[in-house]
Image (spheres, rainbow, N blue to C red):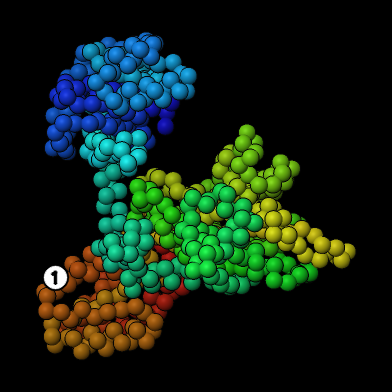
């Protein structure tokens, strides 16, 4: 975000408040910050204000903007500020907060509107273009985000430097709505949520479960070639495990806790690494037996706040394709590179381009991390060397490290240009110290080992939210829950269609035959809405020639083909995990 853009957006928030007071003199303005794509302002109204009022408010904003010259500021005393905002309890509360912080109280004015504000406005009003903003929606918001406080009315708006940027953003938002995984997931019958189960706890249908299984199998296929072994762990643990690991102090407010009948305190696991240390700790290992590589796809649980939940992107139950390597420091680089290669292969299968963030600790806040400064410098140097050796598009992320060690975080952009963190590889020298994990080295001495954390998808839920939106539900053939649908033209063609379906099933193709009473046109439309990769239509001609008419979702009509040739073609596409550019 350009530096001047937040200032422009904050200025539009002032303009919104000015327009509201013109149209609704009894309204009470509260707070109005700049946000990622624009601004908002929260108000208390005496009568409801909804989306239907936005055009009128926008018009008033543009009228007022014509009269504004610049922003001027003045510093006032506590008494003067209290007098000015005597009728607004929200501003009075903010004034008291400023007093407690021993900060100056400043007011900013433009035209007839003056607001309590610490500053950060457009350098000149000429930077605020009347065609570069748009009010978008009205929502409810608790005062200062506290659900025990009064519910206010929040008005959101977009704001950019010019109309072209605004139009581009609006077009991107409209495209995002078409790709929204929360809508597509329901349309494609992949997952659902239940009020009885609880928000943030997705339930997976047979189709969605198949997606999860196929993705996990692919990751396991890549890991097994690199020497990983599967392990399994329980979903709860005594709090002692997390006290030892350091997670209890860091995450105790985000844990689901359980108290047993005997009064023992347990927690639902929010991560898997402490459990895996105990699998390693079951015996004393020789250096000849290292590395030990454990892979485990399992669900974790985090007590996310209701307002933070969003479809599959932010959930309370997340399934991690987790793995941990226990090795000597001298083996670290080789193990990191093995994982790196898995990440590149996996994401390359979906057409994602990756760049790498070297997530480091923030030396200014050493108390936020486990371990010594020397350990951190050594670990971060190793990661920098690996990125250089891989000739990666890499950049530093100061303060982005885990509390126990630095990371290589793989970043990618989706079809809408949004950047996501996907896979991660983390070097941990702290947890082996805390759990006293070692091997017996060549000299017969105990040698402290290191631990590598690796997740390829991160969480299956979050990865699928991104993948669904990136391909708009058009999954590649190998991943599609239903790969082929056969459509008999009429009743006389049903037997042939079912025979073809049986042949494809025997060849391990996921297929169905739709012989419903609906018209052929409607059945074709239904199949296309389900984004099935291949459609086969069979009629008299196909029965006579013992062929079928094939249509590809991505390439259109492909003409007639024999069943054996089709099976060979589909198997080749599945094996190669070919990615279609269509999305």
Q: Residue furthest right?
A: 443
- Is any part of residue 572 visible from this angle? yes
Say whether residue 164 is left or right of residue 406: left
- Taking depth in this image into account, of 291 and 244 the one nearest to the observer is 244
- Taking depth in this image into account, of 560 and 488 the one nearest to the observer is 488
Say whether residue 332 is left or right of residue 575: right
Give how far across and how far down residue 263 sits, in percent.
Answer: 52, 64
Decide: is 80 above or below 382.
above
Which residue corresponds to mark 1?
521
Quadrant (top left, top right, bottom left, bottom right) of the C terminus: bottom left
- Is any part of residue 395 visible from this angle? no
- Taking depth in this image into account, of 562 and 51 the one nearest to the observer is 51
Decide: is 304 above or below 23.
below
Q: Residue at x 18, y 86 (%)?
A: 494
Q: Residue at x 36, y 57 (%)?
A: 200
Q: Classify mark 1: residues with Cα within 10 Å, few (<14), some (14-19) or many (20+).
A: few
Quarter-wise, where is residue 96 in the image? Answer: top left
Give how far across and how far down residue 81 sits, in percent.
Answer: 33, 15
Decide: is 81 above or below 371.
above
Q: For numbered disc 1, what is the local secondary structure?
A: helix
Decide: is 311 above or below 399.
below
- Taking depth in this image into account, of 303 and 388 the one nearest to the observer is 303
What count of labels does the image hold?
1
Quarter-wise, where is residue 126 in the image? Answer: top left
Q: Residue at x 18, y 67 (%)?
A: 525
Quadrant (top left, top right, bottom left, bottom right) of the N terminus: top left
Q: Residue at x 29, y 64 (%)?
A: 196
Give how far across and how far down residue 118 sits, in percent.
Answer: 40, 20
Say whether residue 55 is left or right of residue 512: left
Give how far across and how far down residue 372 sits, in percent.
Answer: 72, 44
Q: Residue furthest front?
A: 262
Quarter-wise, where is residue 221 in the image? Answer: bottom right
């Amino acid at each position: 975000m350009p530096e001047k853009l937040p200032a422009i957006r904050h200025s539009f928030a002032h303009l919104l408040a000015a327009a509201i007071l013109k149209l609704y003199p009894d309204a009470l303005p509260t707070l109005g910050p700049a946000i990622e794509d624009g601004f908002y302002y929260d108000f208390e109204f005496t009568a409801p204000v909804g989306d239907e009022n936005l055009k009128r408010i926008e018009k008033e904003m543009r009228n007022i903007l014509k009269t504004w010259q610049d922003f001027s500021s003045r510093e006032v005393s506590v008494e003067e500020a209290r007098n000015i905002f005597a009728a607004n309890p929200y501003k009075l509360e903010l004034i008291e907060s400023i007093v407690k912080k021993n900060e100056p109280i400043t007011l900013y004015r433009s035209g007839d509107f003056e607001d309590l504000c610490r500053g950060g406005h457009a350098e000149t009003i000429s930077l605020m273009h009347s065609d570069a903003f748009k009010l978008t929606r009205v929502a409810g918001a608790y005062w200062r985000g506290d659900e025990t406080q009064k519910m206010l009315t929040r008005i959101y708006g977009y704001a950019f430097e010019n109309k072209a940027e605004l139009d581009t953003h609006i077009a991107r938002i409209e495209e995002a709505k078409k790709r929204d995984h929360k809508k597509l997931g329901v349309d494609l019958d992949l997952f659902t949520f239940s009020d009885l189960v609880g928000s943030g706890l997705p339930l997976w249908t047979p189709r969605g479960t198949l997606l999860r299984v196929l993705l996990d199998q692919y990751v396991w296929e890549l890991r097994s070639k690199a020497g990983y072994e599967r392990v399994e762990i329980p979903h709860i643990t005594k709090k002692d495990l997390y006290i030892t690991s350091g997670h209890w102090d860091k995450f105790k407010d985000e844990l689901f806790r359980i108290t047993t009948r005997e009064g023992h305190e347990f927690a639902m696991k929010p991560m898997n690494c402490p459990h895996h240390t105990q699998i390693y700790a079951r015996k004393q290992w020789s250096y000849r037996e290292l590395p030990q590589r454990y892979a485990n796809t399992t669900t974790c649980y985090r007590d996310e706040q209701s307002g933070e939940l969003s479809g599959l992107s932010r959930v309370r139950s997340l399934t991690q394709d987790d793995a941990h390597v226990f090795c000597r420091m001298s083996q670290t680089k080789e193990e990191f590179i093995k994982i790196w290669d898995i990440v590149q292969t996996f994401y390359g299968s979906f057409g994602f381009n990756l760049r790498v963030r070297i997530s480091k600790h923030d030396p200014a806040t050493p108390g936020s991390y486990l371990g010594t400064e020397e350990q951190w410098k050594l670990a971060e140097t190793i990661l920098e060397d690996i990125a250089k050796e891989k000739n990666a598009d890499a950049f530093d992320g100061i303060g982005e490290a885990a509390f126990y060690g630095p990371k290589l975080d793989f970043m990618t952009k989706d079809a809408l240009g949004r950047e996501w963190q996907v896979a991660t590889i983390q070097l941990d020298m702290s947890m082996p110290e805390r759990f006293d994990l070692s091997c017996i080295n060549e000299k017969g001495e105990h040698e402290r080992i290191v631990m590598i954390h690796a997740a390829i998808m991160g969480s299956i839920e979050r990865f699928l939210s991104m993948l669904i939106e990136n391909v708009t539900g058009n999954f590649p053939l190998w991943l599609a829950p239903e790969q082929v649908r056969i459509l008999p033209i009429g009743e006389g063609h049903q037997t042939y269609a079912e025979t073809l379906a049986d042949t494809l099933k025997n060849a391990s193709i996921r297929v169905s035959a739709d012989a419903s009473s609906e018209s052929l046109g409607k059945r074709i439309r239904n199949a296309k809405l389900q984004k099935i990769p291949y459609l086969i239509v069979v009629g008299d001609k196909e029965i006579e020639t013992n062929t079928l008419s094939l249509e590809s979702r991505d390439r259109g009509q492909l003409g007639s083909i024999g069943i054996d040739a089709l099976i060979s073609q589909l198997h080749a596409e599945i094996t190669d995990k070919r990615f279609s550019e269509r999305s």
